[in-house]
Amino acid sequence: MWVKVCSISEISEEDVFGFEVEAQRLAVYNIGGKFFATEALCTHEKADLVKGYLDGGIIECPKHNARFEVATGKCLKRPAKHDLKTFPVKVEGGVLYVEML
Amino acid sequence: MVVPENVLKIEEWYSPSITKAEMKQFLKRDNWHGALNFALWFGLLIGVGYLGYLLIDTLWAIPVFFLYGVIYAGSNGRHHECSHGTVFKTPWLNDFFYFFCGVMEIRDIIDFRWSHTRHHSYTIWRGVDPEILVMRPPNFRHFLLDFFYLRSGPRALVNMVLHSLGIVSAHSKNYVEPEDYQKMFWWSRANLVIWLSVIGASVYFQTWLPLLYFGLPRFYGGFFLWCFVLLQHVGLSENVWDHRKNTSSVDVNPFLSFLFMHMENHVEHHLFPLVPYHQLPKLHKKLKDQVPVPYKSLWHGLSKVVPMVLAQRKNPDLFIDRSVPFEAD
């Protein structure tokens, strides 16, 4: 089911924003004009990745530096062990939609 | 292993007010700050070390090597900052210096990573934080010994040997994830090889010089470092979800600030661990109305902490109550 999240103008380039979608916190990223969405809470201790450091398509947890590849959710660095859940996104008419699975 | 969820009720840490746009600026990384910092630090070590070598047969060698040791103990702050991955923008540079400074600190990179993760998650929560320097009630003899790393240092050496032999130390069992034990063993072995090389060189050439330059300085040069790190958490509140109460910042001179990588802004570091060290002074200015006033100097801080440590021997419930502008909700 596709859920409307926001206007793409709300997410500046090389940035990450947090949204509540159906009682779940998501992180939406704009990387080089491409959009991605993952669960927002680090799989280690549930810190909010929206407050983390985004660089080169990798989001770093603000608490303990766990790293995840935004496009795939793949966990790249300890102390996290598990990948982030990712969500398909699409942009229609300047509006970003996320598919809630 | 200590499982925090089984020991305490986990709550949210106090978080100060700062906009996302502001934080994005503070989180920015680069390579040149770290490169300059390390270049200066190595330059000082080499310069002072060479001076010590020239004066080795004179009494002047004593204060010069003491200074060398003080500079060498800057490995502590560098090891710590590199463990956070924020000194350099390029990850492998952080990893390389994290390992290198870790050898000087007698800490392997796996053990410290897990210990420090636990410390940031459960700062000064008794029974959970493995990095509480002075337990309650304090053992004053241990407290004094660590002015020259004479209690923690030998324990670190023993742990390095144990881990190299594939035996997990009792302390590390509390916080290192079992699936990382093998990695910890191999990184400890890497540390041990370097240490044994230095000791071996000393034995082979029948001179103290190799150890005087590598290894021993962490002990004989640790005085100011211990003074500095004591102020960060010792004597303060424990078992609270507010870093403003269990952590303190301190104003120090530019030399100590450089040596210890701006860790004098320790409250700010705990509030935002991902902020690179060189941004901490600006972050402190931004947050100063929301956090307690720092200790005015190293000695001002010690004038509070040392009497409190002595008092806690009789009454462990006493603590230094840091005034905060606002109470946490």
Image (cartoon, grey):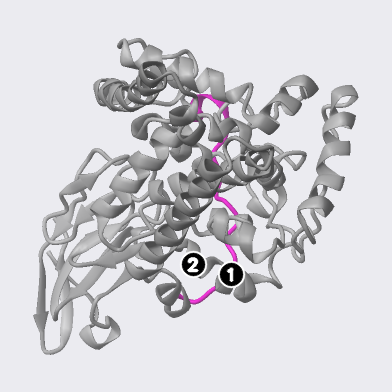
Residue B63 coordinates in the image, percent (x, y): 68, 43
Which residue occupies the foreground of this view, B196 or B189?
B196
Residue B42 drawn above or below residue A31: above
Counting other residues with Cα less than 10 Å from the Cα at mark 2, is it few (<14), some (14-19), or many (20 or more)? some
Residue B18 covered by magenta stretch: yes
The chain holding disc 1 is: B
Q: Marks 1/2: CA distance?
A: 7 Å
* Residue B281 - label: 1
In the picture shown, does residue A48 fall above or below B119? below
Which residue appears at 53% of the width and 57% of the height?
B261
The quadrant in which residue B224 appears is top right
Question: Residue at (74%, 59%) from the top-left corner?
Answer: B327
Q: Is residue B65 left or right of residue B288?
A: left
| Residue segment shown in magenta | B4-20
Residue B267 versus residue B110 in the image, above or below: below
Q: Is residue B1 visible?
A: no
**Nearest the eye: B301 or A26:** B301
**Label drawn at residue A48:** none
Q: Say which quadrant the N terminus of chain B sits in.
A: top left
